[in-house]
Image (tube, helix red, strand yellow):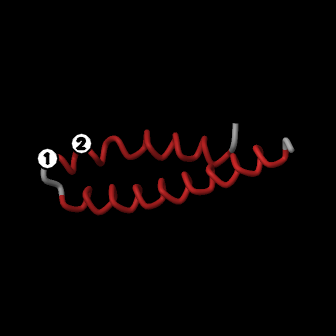
Amino acid sequence: MSQNFDALAALVDATRGDVEKAENGNKAACTRVRKAMQDMKNFAQEIRKEMLECRDAGK
């Protein structure tokens, strides 16, 4: 499995606590969640690129 996928999974797990805090009105946690979501977006984009490379390498 790719390192980016593992990093994405770890980031999701690490962000869970901040999501709960944000839902309870913690504004600092909201900021941390937004930053983590941006990081998740970047990891997801890298994973997409890796998967395209895997697909194209099979040709």
Nearer-the-camera pick, 57 or 40: 57
Up the image or down, 45 lies above or below 5; here it is below
Residue farthest along the left direction in this orientation: 25
Residue at 60%, 43% (x, y): give it: 5
Q: Are marks 1 and 2 in contact (CB under 8 Å)?
A: yes
Q: Residues within 10 Å of mark 2 (few under 14, many from 20)?
A: some
Label total for image? 2
Quadrant assignment for the C terminus: top right
Q: Position of residue 18 (x, y in %)?
A: 30, 48
Q: CA distance from mark 1 to mark 2?
A: 7 Å
Amino acid type for the residue under numbered disc 1 = Asn
Nearer-the-camera pick, 50 or 58: 58
Quadrant assignment for the N terminus: top right
Residue at 77%, 45% (x, y): give it: 54
Amino acid type for the residue under numbered disc 2 = Glu
Up the image or down, 30 lies above or below 16; here it is below
Residue at 69%, 43% (x, y): give it: 2
Q: Secondary structure at mark 2?
A: helix
Q: Is residue 16 left or right of residue 47?
A: left
Residue at 25%, 58% (x, y): give it: 30
Which residue is tagged 1? 24
Nearer-the-camera pick, 17 or 2: 2
Which residue is tagged 2? 20
Q: Residues within 10 Å of mark 1 (few under 14, many from 20)?
A: few
Q: Secondary structure at mark 1?
A: loop
Q: Is residue 38 left or right of residue 42?
A: left
Q: What mark, if any, has residue 46 been given in the picture?
A: none
